[in-house]
Amino acid sequence: MYILKKQNWHISENEVTDETLFNKRRDFLKLGAAALVSSSIISEKLAAVENSKRKLLKFSKTSFGKGLDLSTFDQASTYNNFYEFSLSKKDPAKMAHTLNPNPWDLEILGEVENPMFISLEDIQNSYPLEERIYRFRCVEGWSMVVPWIGITLAHIIKKAKPTSKAKYVKFTTMFDPEQFPDQKRGLFGNIPYPYVEGLRIDEAMNDLTFMSIGMYGKVLPNQNGAPIRLVVPWKYGFKSIKSIISIELVEKEPLNTWKMINEKEYGFYANVNPEVDHPRWSQARERKLGSFFKQKTLMFNGYEKEVGHMYKGMDLKRFY
Amino acid sequence: MRRVLLFILLVLPFIYLIITVQDANDPIKYIFTYTGLTSLILLIGSLCISPFKKIYNLLRYRRMIGLFSFFYAFLHFMNFYILDAELSLNFVLKETLDKPFIYLGMISFFILFLMALTSTKKLFAKFNKWHKFVYIVLILVVIHESMAQKVLSSLEYSFIVVTTILLGYRLYNYKKA
């Protein structure tokens, strides 16, 4: 009798790896190799995916910022100062998934006749959203140009009917250590929380002062201050407070977080001014994101015509 | 052979910088941070050699590490002069005289420059004593690096701790001698 003796390298058909699986292994290896080459490229790709996933907004275009050269979505969404997540500017894009912007109720309180809560849907449904292209200048010396989507702050404030005692507006970022990891660290946090900012009432009611819920056609990415943030284009970026939970109309000038941390370097007004230097660096020129060459910083960041009158006769060196 | 390997190792950060700066969001700032930190870390590295020499003697590599620390400080300065100041000597002078943050860096760079000049065998024998100024550089650079931040992080605290230990060790040895 002939006995077929199997060599030990003979395996049966069902043990053979399927060709598609075999090819998948190659893809997997490629992915691993890619990860080794550059994790930043991958995170950029992820950011692009994220932008395509975010909800589209309906809005009307405006003439604000016509002719300005837009920064890319990638630049604006991967270079963020959001200390509630990290001191690094690259980290918030990777960490901000812990922030839950929906549902969100923005409280309007203080010196108003109609204290109220506004939900994000209210804002989207009861006001026509507009897109405004603004210059954005950070106190650190870099700048970008962003197409924000939202409504003027004046719209929201008028609805609450401020009283005659409402001289200033105080904004507060959400405080929730579950959503913002650095808020868990208490005294060892990067900065004291919650983050607070403020405007004079006339600044708040100025037509340029914007409450943004989106950018680049879609809702705000979390790291850019979702679901709703302030945008004050003629002031340094730290005034444009993110993820706002309350707006309080008050009688006295509120103490904003950066002024509290270092009064000698950061004031209440923080108007962009090429003639008043930061004690450690010049503010005369700025570095637009992505560029190896600097450009001139404009008085009030280029919005002197719209806002200059509010500061007539004020010593801008003293009220920096 | 080891010397060549060390040389390549110390050039690698420069190559990495050239590759990564091309997609940096804020290239000028990125170059500042990158060259500054590399220079400071190499400076600390070169100063750690002498305390450890009994355990592992690397004294003969100290000069090369020190020179590379100067090389990255030089790139740092050139970034300030070429890209940040846009070749305006006027701006460089004004900022240097005006702002502590800048003059601390400038003084350090100047001392490192003199040390690099006097680092040949012959000159080092003569200026050996003056090279103790490197500890002043260390203190100034750690302050300069802290001043570049808006708020301090664990990195700045680590630099302060390491500097304190190195200075403490020097002082202790000096008193013993």
Image (cartoon, grey):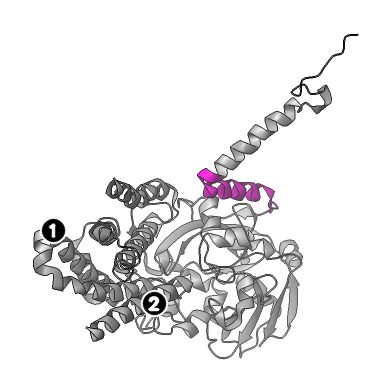
Region in magenta: A36-58
> On the image, numbered disc 2 is attached to which residue?
B160
The C terminus of chain A sits in image quarter = bottom left
Q: Crowding near pointer 1: few (<14 within 10 Å), some, many (20+)?
A: few
> On the image, numbered disc 1 is attached to which residue?
B120
Q: Distance between the residues labelled 1 and 2?
A: 31 Å
> Vertically, is A180 above or below A95?
below
Which chain letter matches label 1? B
Front residue of this view, candidates B38 and A110: B38
| SS category of the residue bearing label 1 | loop
> Vertically, is B63 above or below A198?
above
- Residue at image point 43% right, 73% down: B158
- Comparing labels 1 and 2, the label whose residue is closer to the camera: 1
- Residue at image point 40% right, 50% down: B21
Residue B70 picture quarter? bottom left
Magenta span includes A48: yes
Magenta span includes B170: no
The N terminus of chain A sits in image quarter = top right
Counting residues from the start of the chain, the first of labels 1 and 2 encountered is 1
Position of B145 compared to A185: left or right?
left
Residue reaching furthest to the right = A1
Position of A140 compared to A44: left or right?
left
